[in-house]
Image (tube, rainbow, N blue to C red):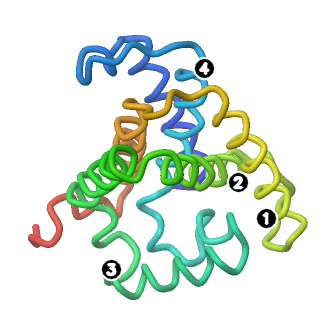
């Protein structure tokens, strides 16, 4: 499934969850208008996180050479594309890691996560020039930095809904890939 499809499905899943008041029912947090809007972009970006193991995918070029070499490292460490990062364990780790970061590392972690997820969303939703050069990832960086600065003034000190958006986005990716012929190793490391 292409990166833009994953990102669009992540944004759609967040919009449906917000409309159904799932964040309020599940974690007891009422979402404001800015939370819903920002959450859609962050969930769209998080929907690309399982492809960290794909060194030639959309995610590999969102921050130029830095993201490309990082994705190559993750590909090697996870056993290749559609292995460890395409599992329910990975979804649990993204949710738990973002929850711990937001709660224990506070604002610096939260803003770094916003920047990364906005960068992914900008790239995947094609809000930047195409290609892998600085003309593309430079625009991604500028737009994500501007979005992060705005989010800094809009978000609460500890946005309780953010880990929910991250986990939901990663889960949306797995559902999308399960619909393809290749499928996903949902219960990795258990072989199915």
The label nearer to you, 3 versus 4, is 4
Image location of residue 6, percent across then percent down: 52, 47
- The first of marks 4 and 1 along the sequence is 4
Tag 3 and tag 4, C-beta contact below 8 Å:
no
Image location of residue 81, percent across then percent down: 40, 75
Image location of residue 80, percent across then percent down: 38, 81
From the viewer's side, name the closer residue of 163 and 181: 163
Q: Residue at x 34, y 18 (%)?
A: 29
From the viewer's side, name the closer residue of 25 and 81: 25
The residue that label 2 is drawn on is 123
**What secondary structure is found at the residue carrying circle 1?**
helix
- The first of marks 3 and 1 along the sequence is 3
The residue that label 1 is drawn on is 137
Tag 1 and tag 2, C-beta contact below 8 Å:
yes
**What secondary structure is found at the residue carrying circle 4?**
helix
Distance CA(mark 3)–CA(mark 4): 36 Å
From the viewer's side, name the closer residue of 11 and 99: 99
Residue 34: which disc? 4
- The first of marks 3 and 2 along the sequence is 3
Distance CA(mark 3)–CA(mark 1): 25 Å
- The first of marks 1 and 2 along the sequence is 2
- Left or right? Give the position of 143 relative to 171: right
């Amino acid at each position: 499934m292409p990166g833009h499809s994953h990102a669009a499905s992540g944004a759609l899943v967040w919009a449906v969850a917000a409309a159904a008041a799932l964040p309020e029912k599940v974690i007891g947090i009422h979402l404001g208008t800015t939370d819903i809007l920002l959450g859609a972009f962050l969930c769209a970006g998080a929907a690309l996180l399982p492809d960290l193991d794909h060194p030639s995918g959309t995610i590999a070029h969102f921050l130029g050479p830095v993201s490309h070499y990082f994705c190559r490292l993750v590909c090697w460490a996870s056993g290749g594309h559609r292995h460890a990062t395409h599992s329910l364990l990975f979804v649990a780790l993204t949710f738990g890691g973002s929850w711990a970061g937001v709660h224990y590392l506070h604002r610096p972690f939260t803003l770094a996560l916003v920047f990364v997820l906005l960068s992914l969303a900008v790239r995947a939703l094609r809000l930047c020039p195409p290609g892998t050069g600085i003309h593309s990832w430079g625009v991604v960086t500028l737009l994500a930095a501007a979005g992060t600065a705005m989010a800094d003034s809009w978000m609460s000190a500890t946005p309780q809904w953010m880990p929910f958006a991250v986990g939901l986005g990663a889960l949306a990716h797995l559902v999308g890939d399960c619909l393809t012929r290749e499928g996903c190793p949902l219960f990795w490391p258990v072989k199915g």
